[in-house]
């Protein structure tokens, strides 16, 4: 007899939108359609503006107001366009990250979500359907290693500590979902040190050592993917600009994959 399949409430995955006001207008319609779905929560893995902005307060505050339209618990992570890339238009990246934190590091109604203590409040963790979810501040653009190696090093130490805690919890659960904005499988454009070496080593170890399933969800390169880039590590890359689309995921306990993820046709 086949094991009984226990299906938990679906959740949504998205990222790398909106990049412009026309895209923000389209996103309003997608939010309406998502609100009609029975979802446990919505995760946006980061990049709520383009690599050339807008990076100012008005745009960021408008996005907070827009995301408040979700009727489901909404989790947002920071992406490179939201802070590190803002230097391209004259902003201080650390000031922009501080602004992001002031807008989006808040309790999330309807979800028992824990934030990392200290200044890295954007690193989050929660549980759903006997699976641990860990959201991390790992942005594209080589993880800010080339522009600010000190910032990179300090932040990644906090990321590793947070991920280690999530791993310890997940070893007693059915699985672990790791979420970040960056595509860590990209190599630096100009050569040199790879800002993703450390996280790749941890993902490689998680894929081969965890007793349950491990899923990585990221954005960054705007191409939907569902593959296994490392042994034991399933990867979902969400859609991104110019596509205003999302993916629906479910935890299916008793199934071969544990995670059922499908892109939603808009």
Image: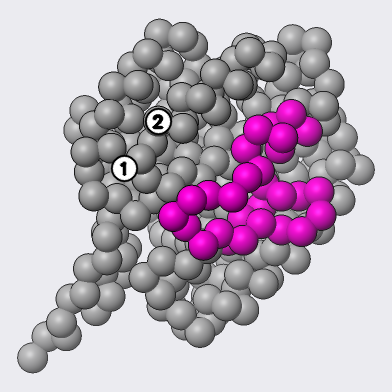
Does 5 appear above or below 241? below
- Magenta stretch in the rendered image: 97-125
User: Looking at the picture, how far across and down is residue 16, in whole percent?
Assistant: 49, 29
Any mark on residue 247, and which? Answer: 1
Residue 100 sits in quarter: top right
Picture residue at 21% right of the left edge, 38% below the top: 36
Picture residue at 48% right of the left edge, 51% below the top: 109
The mark that comes first in sequence, 1 or 2, is 2
Task: Kindly tell me whether residue 101 is visible in this rendering.
Answer: yes
Q: Secondary structure at mark 1?
A: strand
User: Looking at the picture, how far across and down is residue 252, in whole percent?
Assistant: 26, 69
Q: Which residue is mark 2?
A: 69
Residue in front for this viewpoint, 226 or 212: 212
Measure the alpha-carbon separation of dots 1 and 2: 19 Å
Q: How many labels sit on residues?
A: 2
- Residue mark closest to the camera, 1 vs 2: 2
Q: Quadrant of the C terminus?
A: top left
Left or right: 217, with 137 as reference point? left
Residue in front for this viewpoint, 234 or 132: 132
Q: Is residue 120 magenta?
A: yes
Q: Quadrant of the N terminus?
A: bottom left
Specify the farthest residue to the front.
109
């Amino acid at each position: 007899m086949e094991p009984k399949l226990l299906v938990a409430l679906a959740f949504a995955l998205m990222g790398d939108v909106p990049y412009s006001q026309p895209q923000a207008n389209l996103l309003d319609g997608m939010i309406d359609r998502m609100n009609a779905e029975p979802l446990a929560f919505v995760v946006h893995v980061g990049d709520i503006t383009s690599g050339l902005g807008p990076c100012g307060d008005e745009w960021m505050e408008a996005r907070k107001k827009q995301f408040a339209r979700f009727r489901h618990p909404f989790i947002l992570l920071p992406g490179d366009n939201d802070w590190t890339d803002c230097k391209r238009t004259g902003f201080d990246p650390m000031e922009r990250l501080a602004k992001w934190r002031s807008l989006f590091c808040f309790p999330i109604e309807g979800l028992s979500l824990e934030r990392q203590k200290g200044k890295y409040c954007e690193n989050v963790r929660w549980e759903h359907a006997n699976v641990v979810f860990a959201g991390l501040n790992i942005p594209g653009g080589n993880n800010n290693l080339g522009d600010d190696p000190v910032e990179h090093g300090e932040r990644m130490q906090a990321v590793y500590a947070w991920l280690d805690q999530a791993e310890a919890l997940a070893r007693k659960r059915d699985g672990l979902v790791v979420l970040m904005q960056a595509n860590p499988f990209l190599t630096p454009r100009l050569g040199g040190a790879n800002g993703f070496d450390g996280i790749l080593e941890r993902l490689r170890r998680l894929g081969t050592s965890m007793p349950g399933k491990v899923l990585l969800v990221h954005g960054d390169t705007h191409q939907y993917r569902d593959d296994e880039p490392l042994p034991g590590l399933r990867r979902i890359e969400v859609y991104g600009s110019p596509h205003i689309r999302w993916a629906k995921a479910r935890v299916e306990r008793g199934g071969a994959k544990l995670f059922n993820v499908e892109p939603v046709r808009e």
